[in-house]
């Protein structure tokens, strides 16, 4: 483009120069002759202008007026001839003369979402011996190195060849003459899994990790060390270089390894049943299920010892399970093996867990299902054991019934004793109540006698005082009248009152009243009404 502009201006200058020769007017002729070199100079100036679009980058190549590149270098950083490290940003640029410079525009490098950019440098410091990738650096540092080729080839000491770092999603102004960039998908770590990285660059690993006590140590790699990295990556999306790292996705879910008849070959986790031989010579199959899991922290140990293939975990686990079950069966009899299923489970679990811990695999459970279900040699023995067990259960049932009868008899006796004790307690309480009642009555009788005595003494004293005042006969008459009034006694005398020989009637009247009262009291005691007629007393003598 710049050469075309220069040629156009040069042609216009030549036209002006040639045309001036045929122009008769001196002034016009001079003008054309002066315009010719101006057009040529303007052409040279215009041809040095270069334009870089907004989505482009300008790659400059210097063709002359500079030293040659040495040492196998292909990118110039200090004015040498060749492709220049610095690139042109979007806009107008002056001074890039044709022939001296070539300027090519390239689109910006874009890394889309969900991808990473793998970078390979065509120039730089050679890789160390035995290394396939450049050492890993900080992400911000790597971005500066890629976008500034002069810094990469100078102060940054960038390495020639594949870079272990990657470009994250975005647009980059990169010197494509120095760097080759291609996009690949990001690394996805699913849920219930971790990613174990095996670095294909770096120094020799230095971390010695023991998966279990007294187990052989496994060498793991730290940052910038070659080998299996000690720190796994949890679930998520990571910008990793899949060529600089070998990524192994290790599931943390609990898996079940089946040793069941009829399921062998159906999958990685399904194996042929285990056949054991007991100490008394019986051989029969055992249905076994082994649950195991790879903990996130042990995933690097599993990869370092067994590799990434799931079969590499199942194979040693399969061998260990079969050996442990067969060895345990050799020390017991067939019936004991059948009866001690839980003991066999716990014993096998402990042995298998101790062995697989050395490989980073955690055994969570061992389950024994059917034991010799269809074995013809074991069936008679199992039937005999079944009959024995039934007889034993019947005997136990009878013993339980006897114990129940004894307990019922003891319960009846206890209830009778309790009833007798209750009656005895009731009688005892009744005796105590009678004694208390007796004491109460005695106290009441004593109190009543005392009251009567006090009342009699009082009356006697009152009668004595009255008798002193009015005489004993009159006092007696007053008391009789009180009694008559209180009891409603008829006082009509049935005894004739007559005077004495001395002509006084006082003494006879008293005698008549007393007789009447006595007669009334006698009638009352005999149940007769007080007004009933009585036998007339004999007439008094004159």
Image (tube, rainbow, N blue to C red):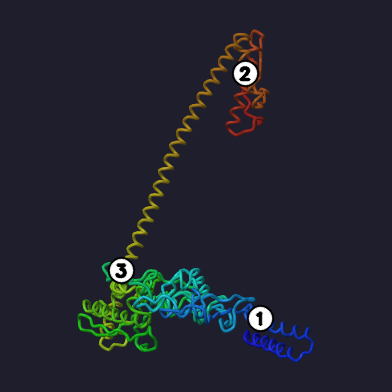
Report whether 458 appears left or right of 249. right
Report whether 83 appears left or right of 324. right
Residue 365 at x, y = what percent? 36, 73
Q: Residue, x 60% and y 77% (percent of image)? A: 95
Residue found at the very far left of the displayed protein: 280
Q: Say which element carries label 2.
A: helix
Report whether 354 appears left or right of 172. left
Which disc number belongs to residue 210? 3
Quarter of the figure with residue 471 = top right
Q: Which residue is denoted by mark 2 in the rendering?
A: 479
Q: Which residue is denoted by mark 1 in the rendering?
A: 41
For the residues marked 2 and 3, what is the alpha-carbon distance in whole angstroms? 129 Å
The vertical placement of 170 against 406, above or below, is: below
For the residues marked 2 and 1, what is the alpha-carbon distance in whole angstroms? 180 Å
Q: Residue, x 57% and y 84% (percent of image)? A: 99
Residue 58 at x, y = what percent? 58, 79
- Sequence-wise first label, 2 or 1: 1
Q: Residue, x 50% and y 23% (percent of image)? A: 450
Residue 366 at x, y = what percent? 34, 75
- Sequence-wise first label, 1 or 3: 1
- 64 and 366: which is toward the camera: 64
């Amino acid at each position: 483009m710049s050469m075309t502009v220069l040629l156009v201006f040069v042609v216009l200058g030549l036209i002006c120069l040639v045309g001036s020769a045929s122009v008769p007017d001196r002034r016009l002729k001079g003008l054309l002759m002066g315009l010719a070199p101006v057009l040529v100079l303007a052409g040279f100036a215009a041809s040095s202008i270069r334009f870089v679009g907004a989505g482009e980058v300008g790659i400059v190549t210097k063709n002359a007026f500079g030293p040659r590149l040495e040492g196998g270098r292909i990118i110039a950083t200090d004015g040498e001839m060749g492709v220049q490290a610095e690139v042109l940003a979007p806009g107008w640029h002056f001074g890039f003369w044709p022939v001296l410079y070539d300027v090519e525009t390239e689109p910006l490098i874009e890394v889309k979402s969900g991808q990473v950019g793998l970078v390979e440098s065509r120039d730089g410091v050679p890789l160390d011996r035995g290394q396939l990738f450049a050492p890993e650096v900080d992400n911000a540092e790597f971005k500066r190195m890629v976008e500034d080729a002069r810094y990469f080839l100078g102060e940054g000491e960038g390495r020639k060849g594949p870079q272990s770092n990657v470009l994250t999603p975005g647009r980059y102004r990169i010197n494509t003459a120095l760097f080759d960039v291609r996009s690949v998908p990001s690394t996805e770590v699913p849920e219930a899994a971790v990613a174990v990285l095996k670095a294909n660059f770096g120094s020799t690993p230095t971390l010695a990790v023991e998966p279990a006590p007294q187990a052989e140590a496994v060498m793991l790699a730290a940052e910038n060390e070659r080998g299996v990295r000690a720190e796994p990556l949890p679930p998520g999306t990571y910008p990793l270089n899949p060529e600089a790292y070998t990524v192994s996705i290790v599931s943390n879910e609990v898996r079940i390894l089946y040793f069941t008849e009829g399921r062998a070959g159906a999958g990685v986790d399904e194996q042929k049943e285990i056949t054991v031989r007991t100490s008394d010579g019986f051989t029969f199959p055992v249905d076994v299920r082994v649950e195991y899991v790879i903990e996130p922290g042990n995933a690097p140990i599993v990869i370092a010892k067994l590799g990434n293939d799931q079969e590499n975990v199942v194979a040693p686990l399969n061998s260990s399970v079969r050996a442990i079950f067969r060895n345990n069966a050799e020390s017991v009899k067939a019936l004991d093996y059948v009866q001690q299923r839980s003991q066999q489970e716990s014993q096998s679990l402990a042995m298998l867990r101790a062995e697989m811990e050395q490989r980073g695999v955690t055994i969570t459970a061992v389950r024994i299902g059917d034991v010799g279900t269809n074995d013809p040699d074991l069936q008679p023995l199992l039937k005999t054991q079944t009959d024995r067990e039934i007889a034993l259960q019947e005997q136990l049932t009878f013993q339980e019934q006897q114990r129940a009868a004894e307990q019922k008899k003891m319960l009846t006796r206890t209830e009778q004793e309790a009833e007798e004790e209750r009656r005895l307690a009731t009688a005892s309480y009744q005796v105590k109540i009678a004694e208390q009642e007796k004491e109460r009555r005695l106290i009441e009788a004593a109190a009543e006698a005392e009251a009567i005595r006090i009342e009699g003494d009082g009356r006697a004293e009152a009668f004595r005082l009255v008798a002193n005042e009015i005489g004993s006969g009159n006092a007696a008459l007053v008391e009789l009248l009180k009694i008559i009034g209180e009891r409603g006694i008829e006082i009509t005398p049935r005894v004739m009152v007559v005077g004495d020989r001395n002509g006084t009637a006082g003494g006879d009247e008293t005698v008549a009243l007393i007789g009447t009262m006595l007669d009334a009291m006698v009638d009352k005691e005999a149940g007769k009404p007080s007004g009933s007629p009585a036998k007339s007393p004999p007439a008094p003598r004159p």
